Amino acid sequence: MSARSHKKFSFAKMAAVAFVFCIAILLASQPAFASEGLGSFSSAISELWHSTGLYGFTQDGGFGKLVMMGVSLVLIYLAIGKGFEPLLLLPIGFGGLLCNIPLAGIAEAGGFLRVIYDFGINTGLFPLLIFMGVGAMTDFGPLIANPKTALLGGAAQFGIFTALLGAIVISNIIPGIDFSLKDAASIGIIGGADGPTAIFLSSRLSPDLLGSIAVAAYSYMALVPIIQPPIMRALTTEAERNIIMKQLRPVSRLEKIMFSIIVLLLCALLLPSAAPLIGALMFGNLAKESGVVNRLSETMQNALINIVTIMLGLSVGSKLAAETFLSPRTLGILFLGLVAFSVGTASGVLLAKLMNKICKEPINPLIGAAGVSAVPMSARIVHNVGQKANRRVFLLMHAMGPNVSGVIGSAVAAGVLLALCQ
């Protein structure tokens, strides 16, 4: 026998001994076995079997739990194997695995995922902390330098209201799918391509749909490189994609500081319901641009947002339980989310085409696609599509204008829906 075969054999023997030892301990821990000895061996075996996950999978809903564990593994694969939004799809997928373990109760009352969920999602705290970190990482300079690009971020929000109306229509014509106005509003926000905003709004209006909405929102954000380029190319001509835009002017530090304060004051005067999201975003940005609290800004950009991302992902994953996720409503949400995302992309491009005919300065219509606020991925995709058309077309900084305005736009849209539906 070779040394390699001997090692395999030894390992197999050790594994078998360890398995038998574990079974013996489990049997000895059963109350009936401990009190009555070998006479209750069959009873102890029965109790042991009923405490296993294998038994749980044989009960009602067990097949659904297996399906959802498969879905969770797909999310983990997309995060690790394909690099699609790994910072969120990985914890969401793992949270989905945990909440579908039979008899574990991890996502039920008293379970640690339920504790995290109640602390951060039910209260709306986690999305706000995420927005704070996003604000600390965001440069609003391109938007300030070219304010008209804010219109493109606003146009991209048409996808939100298209999906809202679509949810109401679907619930009236398709049996088995019943969306209330609050549900429709929560589904529509997927079109903003802003995961924290989608979580914040759905936790307020439709907590039972949170898992489906969050998975749809982050999945479509991850699929930006696949979804957006065909829409952009279909709606623009070769000549439009070749438009070279003028370099943006430098933006002073004072302008950036004043921007954060002015946006918050406008929100306070016009739409207080959006103040939590806008306030968190602008506070993070003010900490960054002020230059006097670098430690706070760096904490928001790194430690704080990383910790919250872990807990947010696990909390969202805990809503992937089979009993709530596997339903016709989930398919409706996934379909409407894709519609919302596509309409938002198309609306931004079409408005940019219109502005290009009206404005004196040429606008490359591709930058309108960045208004969906998937920061900074959609801006990079816009730049890449422009580069394929013409190597002299540099659109990254121009696309960041509608990109960051889309973040503000989705928060404002969430505030409007919250005010109308609560």
Image (tube, rainbow, N blue to C red):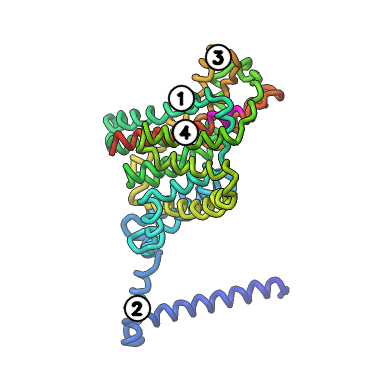
Residue identifier under label 3: 359
Contact between labelled residues 3 and 1, with CB atoms less than 8 Å apart: no
In the rendered image, residue 401 lying in the magenta stretch gets the answer: yes
Q: Amino acid at mark 1?
A: Ala
Question: Disc 1 on helix, strand or loop?
Answer: helix
Q: Earlier in the sequence, mark 4 or mark 1?
A: 1
Residue 383 in view in this figure: no
Pair 4/1: label in front = 4
In the rendered image, residue 381 lying in the magenta stretch gets the answer: no
Residue identifier under label 1: 155
Q: Amino acid at mark 2?
A: Ala
What separation in Å lies between label 1 and label 2 (alpha carbons)?
65 Å
Structural crowding at the residue carrying mark 4, measured as other residues with C-alpha within 10 Å and reported as few (<14), some (14–19) or many (≥20): few
Residue identifier under label 2: 44
Pair 4/2: label in front = 4
Q: Earlier in the sequence, mark 4 or mark 2?
A: 2
| 11 to the left or right of 391 | left
Q: Which residues are magenta?
A: 398-402
Q: Earlier in the sequence, mark 4 or mark 3?
A: 4
Q: Residue at x 40, y 62 (%)?
A: 112
Q: Residue at x 61, y 33 (%)?
A: 252
What separation in Å lies between label 1 and label 3 (alpha carbons)?
17 Å
